[in-house]
Amino acid sequence: MVFDNRLKAREKAQSFAKESLTKNDPTSWFEQVYTAAAGNPDHIPWADLKVNPSFVTWVERENLSGEGKRALVVGCGLGDDAEAIAALGFETTAFDISETAIGWCRRRYPDSPVQYLVADALALPDEWKHQFDFVFEAYTLQTLPVEIRPTVVSNLVQTLGTNGKLLLIARGRDPEDDPGSLPWPLMKSELDEFVRAGLTQVSFEDFWDQEDPPKRRFRVLFVAK
């Protein structure tokens, strides 16, 4: 039943996205998805109500600690990743373009230390520039058209302070693979946008996750100079 709901939710999200793109408005459909869900997370195709497992394994391996540091969570959805990052000791800010999603986060975690805010990755607040030690981006770029991804990358890079780190987790593909129909997996060459924006790539992992069926993922760590 949950699988059927998720399949229908994905089809509806794809319909919303297609309509937004025809109007040259590539981001308004996120709010439509959350509004249409009417409080039911099963109607949001990416809402698993748990921390991203590819992030969990990375954190355990790297022994990540956030004491005395600030973190930014991109496209936070319903807040599971943001809460996990705050639990590591980071002073955490999490944003989403959907006002409904942010309200949902605040209701789920009424006593959370996370600052949940509505913001657009295409036009981030100026006061966030060079303010964060760690930025986490999972599954947001892959939901955006290729032509606007460089702007989002540049904006995210600018939020990092000196020696700040950015961790990206996304679906991956080779150039000859089907580009998909939301999400649109990233090619390895697209990661060069982060380098052009001023970061150094520290590690790159290309792996298949544990989903059923498994999905190909890229997990990439960058550091600011």
Image (cartoon, rainbow, N blue to C red):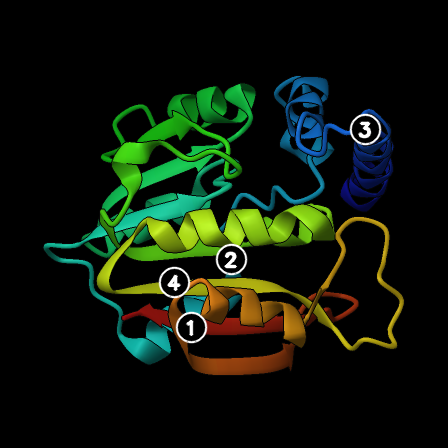
Query: Whole-percent x and y of residue 87?
Result: 25, 51
Compared with residue 216, is residue 138 higher up or lower down, i.e. above or below?
Answer: above
State the residue at coordinates (41%, 21%). Answer: 107
> In this view of the protein, can residue 153 be seen by the observer?
yes
Q: Amino acid at mark 1?
A: Leu
- Residue extending farthest left: 68
Instruction: Measure the C-alpha gap from mark 4 to mark 3.
Output: 30 Å
**Quick one: label 1 or label 3, which is nearer the N terminus?**
3
Using the numbered discs, state the Cα–Cα distance from disc 1 to disc 3 in whole angstroms.
32 Å
**Circle 1: element type:** strand
Q: Is label 2 or label 3 in front?
A: 3
Could you say whether the residue bearing mark 2 is in a helix, strand or loop? loop
User: Label 1: few (<14), some or many (≥20) within 10 Å?
Assistant: some
Relative to the observer, which residue lies in front, 120 or 46? 120
Please, what is the three-letter code of the amino acid marked with disc 3? Phe
Label located before the other in sequence (4 or 3): 3
Q: CA distance from mark 4 to mark 2?
A: 16 Å
The residue at 25%/27% (across/down) is: 111
What label does residue 1 carry, if any? none
Tell me, for residue 16, which label it has, or none. 3
Lower position in the chain sequence, tag 2 or tag 3: 3
Tell me, yes or no, if residue 209 can be seen here: no
Q: Which mark is residue 52?
A: 2
Say if 170 sits above or below 89 in the image: below
Dots 1 and 4: beta carbons under 8 Å? yes
